[in-house]
């Protein structure tokens, strides 16, 4: 063995010993991790996944036989991403769940820092109360429960009512920003007119002159299905996107910005037979199929959907949507973390 080789071996052993000794000081060598930390593009742990309504509805109704809303606080089946085991997460930032409320039940009042949204999937006659405003809920309605607002739910229905919950829980957990407060009573007092924010702020193009809401969130707490559907159906072809079809955002009517500070929500219509072009963006999303029958291809895998199915789109994943019906429109509701990415100047979009 040459002297030089001997020297190299001694040197390599010295490096190895050095590295082995570092953990006790709670330090690590960046040079070993730089390339895995600074990847050319996001390397998402999130897996594209579709949850089938046909499979989940019976499971949700079964929970109604086994667990009361009072016991559960909220009777929800969480949509857990298979790539994020052990976390309450549908994507790395977003959470979706299916909530069931039965006739006469009350889901007691509480508040928390995560923002919540609801999209009603089945049943008439349930309501939510948000900071003293009772809000009636019908299928297709989109309802907000912004950060730190008191909220309880109830049902005056004769049958089950189900909705999709959307929360920014994984993001707020990562930021260690979770605060939670139970209310002293089961139900909070109704201090405002029924559906009052809809009366004040729900007519597109008009705002009250005697006040301008200054909250971070939308002063409009419910966007009725009839209005959203009409708006997306009447959208002109000039406003169509080749990547998303006819797509509208549920905005804060005062600012034109997202309805919640951390999450943007959308309704999109794919015309009969429409196939969108591939794009990707640095925001993750949770989709709910509302009408029609279609398929979405995410990173070269295809997920076929019908009403009630929910699917997760990881960040920066190529995707296309297709309406599989030649005669019927398809409607997708979705929510994303784009407001956060935009605020941090991290938002990018790319066409294939
Ligand atoms: C929550 O408060 C609700 O108020 C629903 O309906 C889902 C998921 C995680 C944490 C809190 C609700 C939730 C939640």
Image: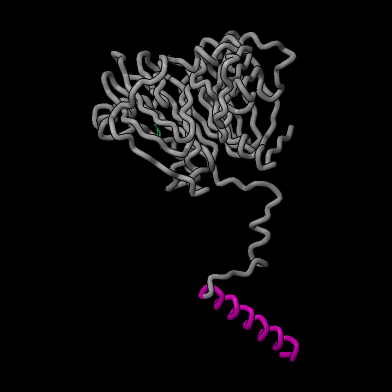
Q: Residue 282: x, y in percent?
A: 65, 39
- Residue at image coords 32%, 22%: 154
| Residue 20 within the segment the image draws in magenta | yes
Q: Is residue 175 above or below residue 267?
A: below
Q: Residue 78: x, y in percent?
A: 40, 35
Left or right relative to 126: residue 199: right
Q: Is residue 22 visible?
A: yes
Residue lying farthest to the front in this orientation: 210
Which residues fall within the magenta stretch?
A: 1-24
Q: Quadrant of the C terminus?
A: top right
Q: Quadrant of the N terminus?
A: bottom right
Q: Residue 317: x, y in percent?
A: 64, 38
Q: Main secondary structure of the magenta part?
A: helix
Left or right relative to 307: residue 237: right
* Ligand 1 sits in quadrant: top left
- Residue at image coords 55%, 25%: 218
Q: Is residue 180 above or below residue 159?
A: below
């Amino acid at each position: 063995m040459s002297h030089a080789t001997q020297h190299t071996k001694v040197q390599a052993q010295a490096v190895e010993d050095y590295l082995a000794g570092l953990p006790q000081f709670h330090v690590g060598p960046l040079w070993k991790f730089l390339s895995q930390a600074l990847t050319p593009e996001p390397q998402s742990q999130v897996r594209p996944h579709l949850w089938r309504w046909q499979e989940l509805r019976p499971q949700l109704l079964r929970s109604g036989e086994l667990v009361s809303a009072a016991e559960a606080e909220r009777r929800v089946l969480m949509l857990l991403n298979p790539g994020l085991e052990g976390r309450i997460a549908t994507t790395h930032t977003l959470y979706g769940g299916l909530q069931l409320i039965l006739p006469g039940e009350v889901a007691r009042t509480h508040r928390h820092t995560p923002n919540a949204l609801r999209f009603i999937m089945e049943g008439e006659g349930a309501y939510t109360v948000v900071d003293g405003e009772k809000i009636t809920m019908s299928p297709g309605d989109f309802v907000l429960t912004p950060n730190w607002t008191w909220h309880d739910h109830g049902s005056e229905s004769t049958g089950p009512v189900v909705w999709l919950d959307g929360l920014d829980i994984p993001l707020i957990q990562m930021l260690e920003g979770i605060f939670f407060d139970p209310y002293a009573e089961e139900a909070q007092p109704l201090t405002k007119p029924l559906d009052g924010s809809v009366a004040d702020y729900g007519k597109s193009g008009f705002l009250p002159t005697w006040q301008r809401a200054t909250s971070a969130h939308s002063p409009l707490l419910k966007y009725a299905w009839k209005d959203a559907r009409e708006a997306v159906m009447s959208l002109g072809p000039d406003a169509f996107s080749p990547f998303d079809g006819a797509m509208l955002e549920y905005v804060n009517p005062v600012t034109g910005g997202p309805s919640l500070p951390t999450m943007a929500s959308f309704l999109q219509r794919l015309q009969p037979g429409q196939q969108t072009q591939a794009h990707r963006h640095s925001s993750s999303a949770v989709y709910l199929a509302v009408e029609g029958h279609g398929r979405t291809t995410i990173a070269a895998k295809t997920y076929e959907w019908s009403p009630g199915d929910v699917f997760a789109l990881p960040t920066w994943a190529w995707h296309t949507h297709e309406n599989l019906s030649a005669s019927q429109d398809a409607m997708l509701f979705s929510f994303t973390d784009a407001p956060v990415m935009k605020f941090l100047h991290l938002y990018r979009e790319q066409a294939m």
